[in-house]
Structure formats: structure tokens, C-alpha cells
Amino acid sequence: MATTELEEPGNGGLSERAMRSLKAMPRAWNRFWRLVALYMPKRLYARSLIIVIAPMILLQSVVAFVFMERHWATVTQRLSQATVRDIAAIIDMMETYPHDTDYANIIRIAQDRMQLKVDLLPPDPLPAPGPKPFFSILDDVLSAEITRQINRPFWIDTVGNSNIVEVRVQLEGKVLRVFVRRSQAYASNTHIFLIWMVGTSLVLLMIAIPFLRNQIRPILTLAEAAESFGKGRPMPRDFRPRGAEEVRRAGFAFIQMRERIERQIEQRTAMLTGVSHDLRTILTRFKLQLALAGSRADTKALNQDIDDMQSMLEGYLAFARGEASEDAGRFDLEAYFQKLGEEARLRKRKLSTTLVGDRDVHVRPNAFARLMSNVIGNAFRYARTVEVNATHGRGTLLVTIDDDGPGIPADRREDVFKPFVRLDEARNLDASGTGLGLSIARDIARSHGGDITLDNSPLGGLRAVIKVPA
């Protein structure tokens, strides 16, 4: 006895091939949905329309198929049966009364009672079969019924005149020609059903599309408000929670979250401002006491320490404040690059700048100027040659700063964005600084919805890339 596959006792009688097929089904299903997600539209409005339209089209396709396959074909077959039955009855009457040479009574009865126009033609050969139309349900049904009921050579034409069907049947010594209205042999009112089905669908879509648009608009408005908040821009003036209950709840939650964040920022700024004022008062007293102490040798070093402490205090405060209270406005890149050229001449640095696109960007001007100054100032401090390339287009500003300085090791590039971090091996310890320059720069960039990244420069030093929406 031969066996085709071995069954494993531990698999409930399933063969190894069946087990592999079962294991492959989830992977195939996941691949299918990944393919669908790849070609599906990404916007919510388009997906909502598909959710509404796709089931409607599927349902109408099924209904139309069932209607065409069952009702339309059945009605057409019954009409064709009745028409061919009338033609067969005419042929039977002509064969039953052969002495009536002109068949006038039979022709009159066919025309008055059966609505058929009957003619007798000479016994010439029937025309050659013509090409069938693309949708030939009438040709197929009528031909089958003539073959079944009459069983004589015949020829039909359903294409020549759209409202008339011509039938020719070969008899003994003559040819019977019958003109039949298409409506007698064919369910010609089917298009009314299709028109009603398509028409009602269009009416439903005309109602559903504006309704969907109104339901999705609050979601888009909420996304715009959240995006503006993420870029540090003010909330749209006309924003208020609208739409369905869930969307309203999300809108109110966003407003409350924004208010809490702004309140925390204000409290932090107010607290740091108070602390800064107190510390500045103490530093002022130190300076006054040193000034009264005279010109002793140690007062110069103490004054330098006080200046360093004041510089660090200003840096801490600027980092904590983050320029968050400033409103967005216009920033002129070309004018800023001209100022950079003057600074480069004063510092005796070689600077080249390029600008591609619009010179005006929509950012918080003071904060963005501080961001650029911190990054480019580092390049001026540690390099001799600096190149600044800016590209503004498609709602994004991309600024690339290259220098020929000592650079930063790849494993330490994220560390320099941490507050109070300085790289001893790449920086001059005698220079004053707090280690907050790049931290403040990245904080400003991210408050605009962008970021700063570091990489190797073609000049041999460090490349800083600033990318912000503008």
C-alpha cells in the first residue's frame, strides 16, 4: 500500500505540507496588508471617502451582477421564447394550409395579433452570418430558441436597426422573413434600473462628501494648531473645539495641555528672573567692595571671576528661558549674512556664504539669530575657514555650516548638546564659556519644530546642519 504524505502524530493528523501552509498564511496576510497600506492614500479625507465609496460600489456591483445574471437573462429568455413560439406558429399555419399561395390571412393575423411583420422571399440562400455584438445576450438566447423550437436553417440580425430584429427562416421553396420589435424579444428597460442605481448613488455621495468634509475639518484644524505649537508659533485665531464629541474632547485636552505648558514656562522664567536679580545684586556688591578695596594685586583676578560668574548667570538664564515668549516674524537671511561678514573680518576669519531661495523666513527672529550666532560663533572660535550654505524652499530652511577646525569625535557629538558639557581635548580652556551654546541652539531649533545635527565636514572639521520649518 502506497502513501503520499506522512502524518506526524503530534500535529493532530496534519501533514508536514499542511503545517507549512498554515504557518505561511499569517505572513502572506501581513504582506497583503503592507501592500495595501503602500498604495492607500495617506490623508484622512481620502481614506474616509474610500470607506464610504468602496462598500457602495461593491454592493452595487453584486446587485447588478445578480440582476443581470438572473432577472435580465430570465426575462430576455422568456420574451425570446414567446417570440419564437409565435414565429413557429406562423410556420405551422403555412404548412397546414399550403393551398393559400399568398398567405394573406396568415400575414394579417401575424401583424394584427402578434405584432410581427411577415414577408415571403424567394428561395435564395440565407445571408452569411454577421459579426456578433460585444454584449450578445439576445443573439445567444434567440438563436438557441429558434434552434430548439423551429430547427430549420435561419439567419438573424440584431445589429442593423437598434429597434428592429430581423429573422429569416429557410422553408421549402421560400424564405420567411419576420421583423420583430426588439422590446418583444429583449428586456430593453434594464438601463432604467442601472440609471436609478447610479443616480441614487450620486445623490448619496453628494450628501456624504460635504458631511465627511465637515467632520474632518476639525481634525485638520486641531492638527494645524498642534503643529503651530510645536513650531513655537501662536495658536490660529479661529481655533476652537468643533466636530464630533471625541474630536471636541481632544481639542479641549490640547488647549488645557498648551495652557499648562505655557504656565509652567512662565513660572520657570519668573522664578529664574527673580533668582537672577538677587544674584546680580550680590555681584554688584562684590564689585563695589572690590572697587573700594583699592588697586591691590588680587582685585584684578577677583573682578575677572565676577565677570565670569555674571556671564555664566546670563547663559543659564537664557538657556532656561529659551526665548519662548517671542512671537514669530520675518527674518532676513541676506542681511544676517552681511553682519556675519563684518564679524568674520573683525575676527580675521575667512567666510563664504550662499543663499538659495527666498531670503525671508518665518521664525522667531531674536531666537533664530541667537541659534545661528551660537553655532557659527563656535565655528569662528575654533576654525580659520567657515562656509555657510542656506537653502530655503518647500516650507523648509536648511543651513549647513562647514569649518576646518579640530572637529568633534563621532561618539561625542551628542554630548556637546547637553547643558554645561565642554570637550577639553577640542576646546581652549582659557576661553570663557558655560557649555550652553549648542544646548541653547538645539533648544531653539526644536522649539521651531526642527533640529541640529553634526557630521564630518568636507573642509576637514565639523559640519553643523540646521533644519527648521520656515
Image (cartoon, helix red, strand yellow):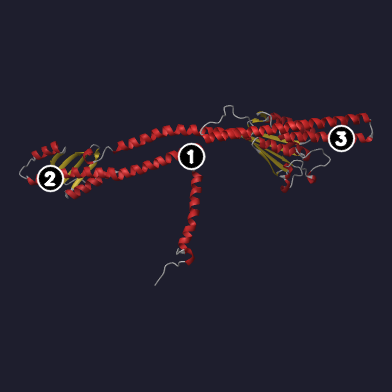
Image disc number at residue 304: 3
At 46% from the left edge and 37% from the top edge, which residue is drawn?
Answer: 49
Mark 3 Cα-neighbour bin, 10 Å: few <14, some 14–19, many ≥20: few
Tell us which disc is closer to us: 2 or 3. 3
The answer to whether mark 2 and mark 3 are in CB contact below 8 A is no
Type of the residue with mark 1: Arg
SS category of the residue bearing label 2? helix
At 41% from the left edge and 41% from the top edge, which residue is drawn?
Answer: 55
- Residue 420, image x, y percentages: 77, 41
The residue to which callout 2 is attached is 91
SS category of the residue bearing label 1? helix
Type of the residue with mark 3: Gln
Residue 218 seen by the camera: yes
Residue 159's quadrant in the figure?
top left
Distance from the alpha carbon under mark 3 to that under mark 1: 65 Å
Residue that protrudes farthest toward the bottom in the picture: 1
The residue to which callout 1 is attached is 47
Mark 2 Cα-neighbour bin, 10 Å: few <14, some 14–19, many ≥20: some
Type of the residue with mark 2: Ile
Distance from the alpha carbon under mark 2 to that under mark 1: 63 Å
Q: Nearer the viewer, residue 416 or 127?
A: 416
**Reading the chain from its start, which is encountered first: label 3 or label 1?**
1
Residue 134 seen by the camera: no
- Residue 372, image x, y percentages: 71, 35
Residue that protrudes farthest toward the top in the picture: 237
Vertical arrangement, residue 311 with respect to residue 2, above or below:
above
The answer to whether mark 3 and mark 1 are in CB contact below 8 A is no
SS category of the residue bearing label 3? helix
**Reading the chain from its start, which is encountered first: label 2 or label 3?**
2
Tell us which disc is closer to us: 2 or 1. 1
**Reading the chain from its start, which is encountered first: label 2 or label 1?**
1
